[in-house]
Amino acid sequence: MAGHRKSKIETKALNLYYGDFHALGDVTAEIPERAITAIIGPSGCGKSSLLRLFNRMNDLIPGVRVEGNAFLDAMPIYGKNTDVVQLRKRIGMVFQKPNVFPMSINENIVIGPKSHGIKDKADLNAITERCLTQVALWHEVKDILRKPALELSSGQQQRLCIARALSVDPEVILMDESCSALDPESTMKIEALMLELAKQYTIIIVTHNMEQAIRVSDISAFMMIDDEKIGRLVEFSATSDMFSNPKDKRTEDYITGRFG
Amino acid sequence: MRITARNAEKTAKILIWTIALMVIAVLIFIIIFILYRGLPVINWNFLTEIPRRSGREGGIASPIIGTLSVTALAVLIAMPFGVGTAFYLAEYTKGGIITRIIRFCTESLAGIPSIIYGLFGFIFFLDVLGLGWSILSGGLTVAIMILPTLIRTAEESIRSVPKSYREVSFSLGGTKWQTIRKAVVPSAIRGIANGIILSVGRCVAETAALIMTAGYELIMPRSVFDSSRSLAVHFYTLVMDGISERNAYGTAAVLIILVFFINVVANMLINRFVAKGR
């Protein structure tokens, strides 16, 4: 495991319940700073659920209950005094489908900063330029910032979504299968972008695509449901180790394509 | 002839086209018929004079003002309550007992004939509150009457806003209110506005409830506390009391043109101010 890196998010015996359904059981992991951690595993093993625990997106679902805790730089994510708004500002998210707002390109970027109280036009313009440059979209769209974002290609839209996530200066970026709705060329661009962004941000991705995990991630987390259908973290190690020398039999079966 | 997929396809197409054309034909026939009989009656004097001799002579200026003021009042009163309730139902509750009560009430209210609202208005606003036959009584009664439509259409358009918009807004650290204001309202507002236009149409056309609450008065109303006959009531009286069929058609034509005009203007306003950039 990449032990030289400081951990950014730590989970301690994290359990998630949807009503009576025990979705995640005792997930304990240390997610390193400024690296890409890939959560892999078969469908329905709780990958997205785990991802959405970090920025408390699961809160939006009625009947959700969390036991155990996770920490962002030692700050409890599930605590009585946790400011969820502030937490989500620090942990940004990119979703599976490019879900731009039906607004102009510029408005899509500034909506976040505006809600955090930035009003000055020049500041907002600077944020737009910075974020779009970070996702290598600036030169493609700088002359059409007032055009509807929905007129962009889906690959461009997804990069716009990443730029939008960057607009509120997060420290962590969660990506929930963010390439699965894109063509191979756009996927390559996003992957290149992830590697670039990992120099500055902590990135956690959920992916169905093991090739992608190998290509971009430093750390891999392999999840699977156990006999009671509870999602468990089976193996958590450097990606190169996991794919060359899996320690758990289930990991080996999965990565060699015996199921999933 | 054997029923093959191809034949069925053809038959279905012809059938659906025929039905649609028949419906459109009936609607167009009614409109043309009324305009054909009514338009010759309409002139400047008809629009600007108040009715004389119970409407045998003169124009319909006071019923036009009566209709417009009852409608404006009703929509202004009902809008905040209707839209507010819709947001409460769609965004703030998770299907508890209160939600079920509200939903049951609105559904029941939607199915009640307007004369019952009229009776309620007559008893409550005229008698209990002592407002008398007035634009205010009429406006309040019709406001209650259009609430279910407003709530239903607004709630549906709020619910039809993709969940992903809310997720994105929350993921950027937006509060609930910011999420509603910035991510939900812009997408829902067209549907909400359509519900309001629909309600305006109902107000303009309302007859039974207004006979009992706004009254029959033909002189020009000076305030919302004055009684005023609405266009639809005027039309009804002209025909049913055999006063003037000619002027009845003139009034009906004005009513149709008014509804058409309100729809066009409202849609223009929505496109101009609400739906920009999408």
Image (spheres, coloured by chain):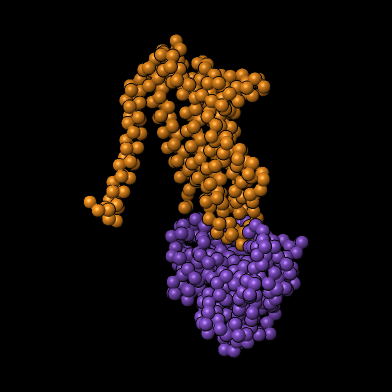
Chain colours: A purple, B orange
Q: Quadrant of residue A40?
A: bottom right
Residue A133 percent coordinates (x, y): 52, 69
Q: Tell me: A86 left or right of B39.
A: right
The residue drawn where x is 50% and y is 55% is A103
Query: Where residue B241 sits in the image (x, y, percent)?
Result: 44, 14
Query: Image height check: is A160 above or below B198?
Result: below
Asked if one can make out residue A200 in the rendered structure from this viewpoint, the answer is no
Question: Residue A222: x percent and y percent?
Answer: 60, 78
Residue A4 placement (x, y as % from top left): 68, 85
For the view shown, which residue lies furthest in the bottom direction?
Answer: A245
* Residue A97 falls left or right of residue A251: left
Front residue of B190/B2: it is: B2
Residue extending farthest to the top is B53
Q: Residue furthest left?
A: B1
- Relative to residue A87, is residue B108 drawn left or right? left
The residue depicted at 30 percent of the width and 42 percent of the height is B18
* Residue for point 32% across, 31% down: B29
Going 60% across and 42% down the picture, which residue do you hit?
Answer: B103
Residue A141 seen by the camera: yes
Q: Note whether A155 is above or below B133 in the view shown.
A: below
